[in-house]
C-alpha cells in the first residue's frame, strides 16, 4: 500500500503564503500523477492542481497565477506553493497520488488551511 502524509497547513492572513508538502511512502514503485484537492465546509471536494510524473501541470482557474505545484520524484514528494491567499482558499487540502501498478488512487489525511480576512 501507499501512505501520503501532508504538512504545511496553518492560519495565514489574506495576501500571505503557505507551502504544502506531501510525502509518499510504502509500496512505491512508480508514482504517476500527483495532485492537491481541497474541500471547504459544506462544499464538494474540488481539484486544485495536478502534476504528472514528467512535470506537466494542471490548475483550477481559481488558483492560476497564485499557486504553483511541483514534485521531487527522487523523494516521492509533491509540493504546492500558495501565494496571494484569499479567504475563499480556506479548506482542508488533500494530497492525491495515482499508482499505476496498483491501478489505484491514494489520499492523504488532509491539512487545514485557514485564510483570515
Image: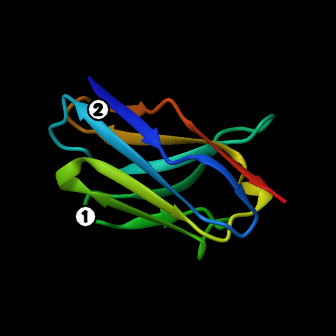
Q: Residue 97's x, y, as percent?
A: 37, 41
Q: Which residue is drawn at 47% across and 59% down?
A: 80
Relative to 22, 11 lies left or right: right
Q: Residue at x 25, y 44 (%)?
A: 31
Q: Mark 2 points at which residue?
A: 103
Q: Which picture quadrant has residue 61? A: bottom right
Q: Name the residue under label 1.
A: 54
Q: Residue 92's x, y, as percent?
A: 64, 40
Q: Which residue is drawn at 69% across and 64% down?
A: 85
Q: In this view, does 33 lie above or below 41?
A: below
Visual colour scheme? rainbow
Relative to 102, 35 lies left or right: right
Screen quadrant of the C terminus: bottom right
Chain-order first, disc 1 or disc 2: 1
Q: Which picture quadrant has residue 73? A: bottom left
What is the secondary structure assignment of the residue under circle 1? loop
For the image, the number of numbered tags is: 2
Q: Residue 98's x, y, as percent?
A: 34, 40
Q: Residue 24's x, y, as percent?
A: 30, 38
Q: Nearer the viewer, residue 88 or 51?
A: 88
Amino acid at each position: 500500500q501507499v501512505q501520503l502524509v501532508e504538512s504545511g497547513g496553518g492560519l495565514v492572513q489574506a495576501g500571505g503564503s503557505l507551502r504544502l508538502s506531501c510525502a509518499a511512502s510504502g509500496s512505491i514503485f512508480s508514482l504517476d500523477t500527483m495532485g492537491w484537492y481541497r474541500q471547504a465546509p459544506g462544499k464538494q471536494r474540488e481539484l486544485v492542481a495536478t502534476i504528472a510524473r514528467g512535470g506537466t501541470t494542471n490548475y483550477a482557474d481559481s488558483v492560476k497565477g497564485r499557486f504553483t505545484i511541483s514534485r521531487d520524484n527522487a523523494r516521492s514528494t509533491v509540493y504546492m506553493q500558495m501565494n496571494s491567499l484569499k479567504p475563499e482558499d480556506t479548506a482542508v487540502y488533500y494530497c492525491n497520488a495515482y499508482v499505476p501498478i496498483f491501478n489505484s488512487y491514494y489520499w492523504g489525511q488532509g491539512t487545514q488551511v485557514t485564510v483570515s480576512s
